Amino acid sequence: MNWDMETDLLCVGSGAGGMAAAIVAAEQGARALVVEKDNVVGGVTGLSSGQCWLGGSHLEEAAGLDDSREETLRYLEHLSQGHAEPHLREVFVDKGREVIEYLTETIGLRLQVVRDLPDYYYPAVEGSRAEGRYLEIEPFPAGELGDWAARCMVTPYGEGYAYVTSNEFNAMKMGRGEPVWDCLARHLERDERCAGAGLMAAMVKAALDRGVEILTESPATRLIHENGKVTGAIVATPEGEKRVKARGVVLATSGYDWNRKMVSSFEALPESGTMCPPTVEGDHLVMAAELGAIPLPSRAPAQTPVFIGYKVPGETVYGHTSFRMWLPGHPHSMIVNRSGSRFCDDSFYPDVATKVGRFDGQEDGMVNWPAWLVFDENFREKYGILPAFPGEPVPEGMATTAGSIEELARLTGIDADGLAATVARFNGFCATGIDEDFGRGTVPWGRLMTGDPRMGENQNLGPLEKPPYYAVRLERVVMGVPTAGLEVDDKARVINVQGEPIPGLFAAGNAATWRDIGGGYNSGIANTRGLVQGYLAARHVAG
């Protein structure tokens, strides 16, 4: 075959998995090429909070925080709910600690511990920790990237997602830091990128410094293979198709958010939105299928971190009507089903995301879906609902508004008697500070994210009492963290239907099935998986 380009490692996708693989390969003396379908680099990681989650890292130890391998594995075992492979779980933890040390000490990424941020299920689950397992990048000066600064992903959903650190947000919520808006203004002025945008900017700089070649608007469209061994890929560059020869190909294209058939089939969601770029279409599954690799689910759909959110009529992102994810739990709000009843701890999004998927036989069907976010004027004035900031009008067409709870129910189709009774009962809980039905405000992670310290002991409780009242119909919002992916082994090699590794083919991050973690989720695990599997693939190819 005549080749147009040649490299040692071809990384398909420029998020955490693909970029980590390229950086590590180059550091080991191998040639690395990253091809990205989008016109900017960073992938879904660049849109994320940028958090990495791992117990027992050297950074956690340096911060003087107690943790252990055993406790980390115990927590992950609970999350898995029997869906994970224990050996792969151990690889995630053990190699994860190695990767974090390698990326910080050898590569020079400036990662730091996120203080005061508990595991999702702390303290209820054995092995959980109050802080120390989340890591984030220090604010990264984008000027260090030169012309590449404009080619690195920055979220189109507002600067607050990319120019504030988790540490700054947490410090403010704990009452010892400056206002987040001041931090945002400072980082914007200096173009210091934070969160996922900062992590990917720092990784792109590390890649460029090591001679990694990066091509944008260049999707890989097909794998090239000989006698079952992957030898390269066809890449559709702006200059035309290129046949790229490689000793190894890493598929790191995230999930399949924009592939309607895949989302419907694997996530059991006939309708959903996404905040991911339209380039996330499940290309890895299509390309690997030719070599006998099939998508494998790793958990029940209800265990997949599909967020709840809402449409924003009039806001266009990526050429489509915008969807926004929603972290529930602010005072003066609640989530109800069509009967007007609360059905979950609506201050903790994992509980909401699980309970909205409840199926109760043929007669009742989806008993908690559709669902609505219901709030009052106090909520609008104090917290707002993006893209509207506190005190700004709710975007036109996004919410139903009424002067009374009964009228709001009539306009939305929610049972009026049920909603009125629920609001009255909820307001009673707000007076006592104890949610007797669902324990709202008792999960530390949820309290930190959406609680208001001004509300007293229970920071997530505030009554619905000031008209007008609002109802926003909720949507399911997928975020690049899928139920199904390519099966990989402990070297990140893709496994075919015969249970054998496909020579020369690897998968990293959300392109790889979650058999290492299994059923549950905790923020930051997805990014860490990408780093670990990219590292494993690069080390294998580079020797």
Image (spheres, grey):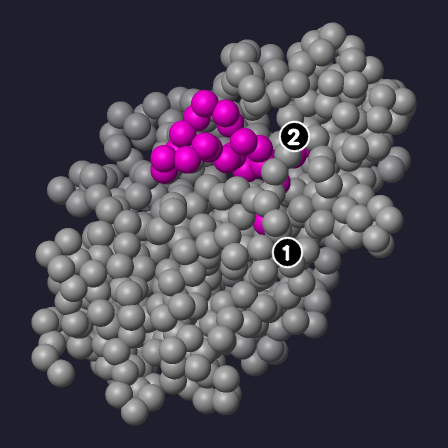
Q: Where is residue 541 in the image (x, y as percent from the top left)?
A: 28, 80
Q: Which of 417 and 165 is in front in this view?
A: 417
Callout 1–callout 2 Cβ contact below 8 Å: no
Position of the N terminus, as image quadrant, is bottom left
Q: In this view, does 125 lie to the left or right of 50?
A: right
Name the secondary structure under disc 2: strand
- Type of residue at label 1? Ala
The answer to whether 533 is drawn above or below residue 51 in the figure is below
State the mark number for residue 63. Answer: none
Q: Where is residue 379 in the image (x, y as percent from the top left)?
A: 65, 18
Q: Neighbour class for label 2 at 10 Å: few (<14), some, many (≥20)?
A: many
Bounds of the magenta segment: 306-329
Please give the residue where the numbered disc 1 appears in the rendered image.
Answer: 268
Q: Is residue 130 left or right of residue 506?
A: right
Q: How far apart are marks 1 and 2 (CA)?
A: 19 Å
Q: Where is residue 232 in the image (x, y as percent from the top left)?
A: 23, 76
Please give the residue where the numbered disc 2 appears in the rendered image.
Answer: 473
Main secondary structure found in the magenta portion: strand
Residue 317 inside the magenta-drawn segment: yes
The answer to whether 275 is drawn above or below residue 457 in the figure is below
Q: Which of 235 and 486 is in front in this view?
A: 235
Q: Position of residue 261 (x, y in %)?
A: 52, 57
